[in-house]
Image (cartoon, rainbow, N blue to C red):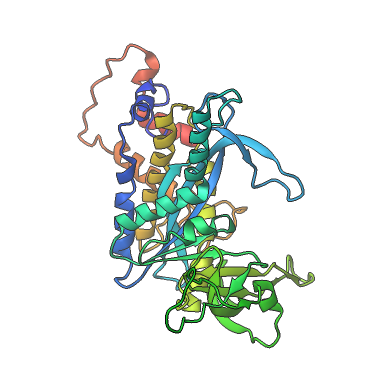
Amino acid sequence: MSASGKQFQDWSAAYRLFKENRIDQRKLFTPVITGILDALEQDDPLVTMMDDTLVRKCGRKIAGTGWKRDPLGPAFHTNLIWGQRYLQISAALPDSNTPGRACGIPIDFHHAPSPAKPRKNAPPEAWEEYKVQQKTCKISAFGATQLAELRRKVPDRKIVCTLDGGYTNKELFVNIPENTTIIGRIRKDASLFLPPDEPIGTSRGRKKYYGEPLPTPEQLRQDDSIPWRSVTAFAVGKHHEFKVKTMAPVRWKSSKDKDMLIVVIRPLGYRPRKGAKLLYRNPSYLICSDPDMPIEQLLQAYLWRWEIELNFRDEKTIMGVGEAQVRTPSSVQTLPAFIVAIYAILLLAAHSIKATPSCLPPPKWYPKQLSGRITTQKAISLFRSKFWGINIDSNKSGFASKSSTERTPFYSLSSIKSAVCYALK
């Protein structure tokens, strides 16, 4: 509203737009998904990333708020914050100029609140309903529902979804949609098994899902008899060579009768500064629902998962997701999703620009920008310059425009001039 010069006008109509639930959120990201699919090659899979984020709040009457664990707190102490939880799915749009680089664009954003706990003296029916809601509102179960909804929106394209360790469980790996591959982090002490032997003749009893036990991912990493394999993938602005070990097909207790692929990634060495001691990251253990997936494609798809963390940062710090003072269930759901959809359209438009547009030179203290990629802040600056330039130059007839009929003095001021002044403030 400030960018369009309406910061001094009544904004209650904008709040009522989201309060009355006039926006169909199921169709909000449809143009973004269509634009991403049109930019991909015909045989390329749709690589997605799914994760949840917290939005800090203060009011106790806001719908969907509750005490949540702070993910930015120290590992030795659990901090709690009062806020809302949202689930997001982003799609990776590869860069045609730099092989391996991709931009994460949100394609789904939903409010995922926890159920309200009944009082101690509540009737038994309320407690039974609460137990049912606990299972359906669990973030992994909600993620499985949203992944199935995305499968219905994109019926003809293969989907590859990368997850963090909090989603690598039975809720997602048992309910994998058709023509969909899931890649997630797994515990280093996970119990793995061989597929069961085929029964000879008729067999009695329950169906066997697991065969002989296999080494854990940590034991696989420490086994010197299994050689490391070199794989090249793009990350942090350049191509790196990763050392990996694989084991397939395997069975996992959370996958039942589905064969899986285990990938162990050796930690990379790095120096925090020039001349410093060589340090190492922690090893990574991945599980993939497609045992025949090429390891190069699997590793690159998982490295793109960091793009959703960049989306969360831009949505909160630049786009202002969670800053609007709304508290009804409909506005809490639709307003943040509307802002994220605008952010997705902005990223899609910036990606469609073939050449880097000419802009004002950045300040000297700005970090060096990656070549060929337009940042979110620069995309907003480009949009504002085009939008304001068109409106400032709109009166080219040589005649003065009609004066405003507003009685209040500051209502008669030019909205474009006011918007420019607030942007430069």
Residue appearing at x 24%, y 26% in the figure: 400
Front residue of 351/143: it is 143
The answer to whether residue 286 is above or below residue 232 is: above
Front residue of 313/353: it is 313
Q: Where is residue 252 in the image (x, y as percent from the top left)?
A: 55, 68
Residue appearing at x 50%, y 64% in the figure: 304
The answer to whether residue 390 is above or below residue 349 is: above
Tally the marks.
0
Apparent side of residue 246 relative to residue 76 in the rendered image (left or right): left
Give the image quarter of residue 39.
bottom left
Front residue of 240/257: it is 257
Which quadrant of the rendered structure holds the N terminus?
Answer: top left
Apparent side of residue 276 relative to residue 7 in the rendered image (left or right): right
Give the image quarter of residue 220.
bottom right
Q: Position of residue 54 (x, y in %)?
A: 56, 42
Q: Where is residue 339 in the image (x, y as percent from the top left)?
A: 41, 40
The answer, for residue 415, to whether it is visible in the render is: yes
Front residue of 303/412: it is 303
Residue appearing at x 54%, y 46% in the figure: 53
Q: Position of residue 268 (x, y in %)?
A: 67, 73
Apparent side of residue 420 relative to residue 118 in the rendered image (left or right): left
The answer, for residue 320, to whether it is visible in the render is: no
The answer to whether residue 323 is above or below residue 192 is: above
